[in-house]
Amino acid sequence: MTEKGIKMIEQDAKDIQKVMGEISDAFTRIAAQREFIKEAIAALSEKYMIEKKTLNKVAKIVHKQNIAEISAENTNVEELYEDITIANRDRA
């Protein structure tokens, strides 16, 4: 039975089962790629003494090609931090 309560014909079931198998295979490839990324980051971190979190951030920036966006976000955060800390210093 499907969600609508209609019996599924055999061919439809086979088609869905085939696609589900392909999706499962895709999930397996994704897991393998994530493991590769984790190992590559660890190797770079050990070799060049750079924190893993920094390498992960750089890898994501390289992938997304969004350094300008990240720089702008960081600038906004820095400015807000300075505004907050300066305001607190002025009150003290």
Image: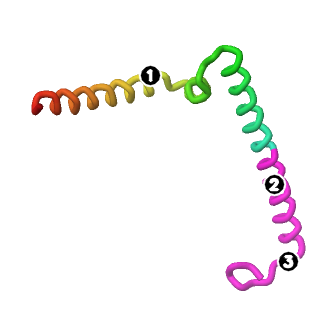
Q: CA distance from mark 2 to mark 3?
A: 23 Å
Residue at 74% across, 79% down: 2
Judged left or right of residue 48, residue 20 is right
**Quarter occupied by the C terminus:** top left
Helix, strand or loop for disc 1 = helix
Task: Give the amino acid at mark 3.
Answer: Ile
Task: Tell me if label 2 and label 3 are in contact, CB under 8 Å.
Answer: no
Q: Give percent across and percent down for residue 21.
A: 85, 57
Task: Give the amino acid at mark 1.
Answer: Ala
- Residue 24's disc number: 2
- Residue 68's disc number: 1
Q: Nearer the viewer, residue 19 or 29?
A: 29
Depicted 34 relative to depicted 89: above or below: below
Q: Nearer the viewer, residue 7 or 31?
A: 31
Q: Nearer the viewer, residue 61 or 12?
A: 61
Q: How is the image coloured?
A: rainbow
Characterize the magenta stretch by its predominant secondary structure. helix
Instruction: Choose mark 2 or mark 3, whichever is in front.
Output: 2
> Closer to the N terminus: mark 1 or mark 3?
3
Helix, strand or loop for disc 2 = helix
> Closer to the N terminus: mark 2 or mark 3?
3
Q: Which residues are magenta?
A: 1-28
Q: Which residue is mark 3?
A: 9
Residue 74 forms part of the magenta stretch = no
